[in-house]
Image (cartoon, rainbow, N blue to C red):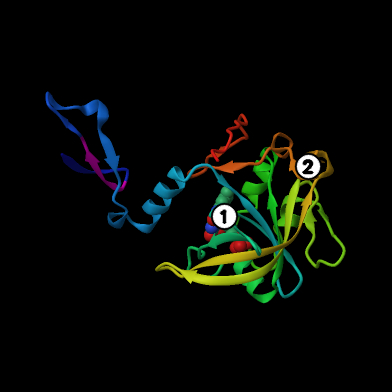
Amino acid sequence: MIFQFFHAGLLLDISGFTSPTGPDHSTQIMQIKLDQLSTSATYFTLTQTVLPRPVAWILSENQESNFNLAPFSYFNAVCSDPPLLMVSIGKQTDGREKDTIRNIKARSKFVVHIASCDQLNELNQSAETLPPGVSELDEIGLKTTLIDGFPVPRITECKVAFFCDRYDIQTIGNNGDSLLFAKVNEIYVNDGCVEINNNGRVVIDANIVQPLARLGAGEYANFGKIMTAKRPS
Ligand SMILES: Cc1cc2nc3c(=O)[nH]c(=O)nc-3n(C[C@H](O)[C@H](O)[C@H](O)COP(=O)(O)O)c2cc1C
């Protein structure tokens, strides 16, 4: 049984099971057909179902050597050899490229940070569209720290930062989104979050990093309880 109706701008299908005693509404399944949704409704639906997402807080540099900071949650680690992160960067509402991808095309080195929960306000503020050349760092008042041999600094307060080189940029989708692959050269981890275990492995304490997670729309999640499970052999 399939019902179709409009709800909050979304065209939805609700399929239900039919039991021997008739339709069982307690086991209805909602099936959302994405090919019938607008791009913005699809975005809204995807970002409320792929949960939670890490956020790449990217500091890049433009050709005039001004720094630009912006958050991106179509983001993850996707390869270990070479070590690659992936970020999907859409267009501005007027169809122009976002400053981050324009900067990374012009200057290949940039820094991806993992923000902690207590940085939500600063991270959210950094998503504001500012005129090119106006730095979110100055607007928000974030401090930065340089490392030797890398032109872009890291945000001092972030507990994890990836010093990256542009590896590849592919154009995807009907709106010309940019799929950025970032090769990680070096990772900064705050001393207080890291220890070397008995096997000589670097262990990062996620309870201290407290990574901020993105949900749908304007919703975020803080770090929950750690669970462990032994991998089957
Ligand atoms: C938490 C969060 C996650 C975001 N994720 C993305 C994303 O994955 N891709 C994207 O294109 N824009 C994303 N945005 C919007 C950009 O941050 C926003 O367009 C920003 O102004 C781009 O800045 P820029 O022009 O300086 O690059 C996100 C915004 C927020 C607040």
Where's residue 208, x and y in %? Answer: 74, 36
Distance from mark 1 CB to nearest ligand 1 atom below 8 Å: yes
- Residue beneath disc 1: 75
Q: Residue at x 57, y 71 (%)?
A: 169
Where residue 12 sits, quadrant-wise, is top left
The amino acid on which the numbered mark 1 sits, given as a three-letter code, is Phe
Instruction: Answer left or right for 47 relative to 208.
Output: left
Confirm whether the magenta stretch covers residue 14.
yes
Residue nearest the viewer, comparing 205 with 149: 205
Q: Which mark is residue 199?
A: 2
Task: Look at the magenta stretch and give its main secondary structure.
Answer: strand
Q: Residue at x 54, y 38 (%)?
A: 232
Q: Is residue 129 visible?
A: no
Confirm whether the magenta stretch covers residue 138.
no
Residue nearest the viewer, comparing 54 with 81: 81
Where residue 183 sits, quadrant-wise, is bottom right
Range drawn in magenta = 9-16
Q: Residue at x 22, y 39 (%)?
A: 15
Instruction: Answer left or right for 131 relative to 35.
Output: right
> From the image, which quarter does the N terminus lie in?
top left
> Could you tell me how many numbered marks the image carries?
2
What is the residue that sits farthest to the right in this orientation?
148
Sort mark 2 into few (<14), some (14-19) or many (20+) by Cα contacts within 10 Å: few
Helix, strand, or loop for circle 2? loop
